[in-house]
Image (cartoon, helix red, strand yellow):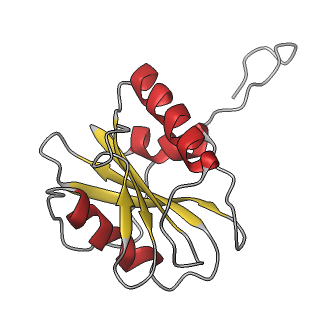
Amino acid sequence: MRDDPSQPEFPVIRVQLVRESSERREAISGPANAAEVAEHFLGLCDREQLIVLMLTAKSDLIGVHVASIGNLTSAIVSPREVFKAAILANACSIIVAHNHPSGDPEPSTEDHEVTKTLKEAGKLLGIPLDDHIIVGSQGRFVSFRRRGVL
């Protein structure tokens, strides 16, 4: 309640992380393991989606966030959307993953640009980007870490 009606009201905002479901907590031991987790979430998607795997200091998976849903050939990726859930979850680092509905996991020029942008944003926020995984068909994937990009 306001004491002085001449003073303007300001919105009060409360930010809270809501856990929608709980799957087993597992350590992400490397690119192949991260690709398996990503495949679980992205394997049957008919359009590009980008997810964020949020990790503890011991690389335990503490959450998965869908940061972007695009169309058949692209998805708009904003660092703001990628890191929002990671900040709320108190993640120590992240791995991003997206699918290529064509089945070919080879990175595009845009994939490289997004990786560079997210790497820089992660440095600024203190939440490093550990890897960027692109999931294709039949278990094929590309890891930017394995390729020396990260």
Q: Residue at x 79, y 14 (%)?
A: 4
Residue 44 located left or right of residue 27: right
Which quadrant is the C terminus positioned in?
Answer: top left
Residue 38 screen position, x and y as percent: 37, 69
Which quadrant is the N terminus positioned in?
Answer: top right
Question: Is residue 91 among the parts visible in the rendering?
Answer: no
Q: Nearer the viewer, residue 123 or 134?
A: 134
Q: Residue at x 55, y 70 (%)?
A: 100
Q: Residue 8, relative to residue 27: is it above or below?
A: above
Residue 98 located left or right of residue 93: right
Residue 86 screen position, x and y as percent: 41, 43
Residue 114 located left or right of residue 16: right
Q: Nearer the viewer, residue 85 or 105?
A: 105
Residue 102 screen position, x and y as percent: 59, 78
Q: Residue 140, relative to residue 17: is it above or below?
A: below
Q: Residue at x 45, y 20 (%)?
A: 124
Residue 91 located left or right of residue 1: left
Residue 135 screen position, x and y as percent: 43, 69
How many marks the image carries: the answer is 0
Question: Is residue 128 among the parts visible in the rendering?
Answer: yes
Q: Residue 10, relative to residue 34: is it above or below?
A: above
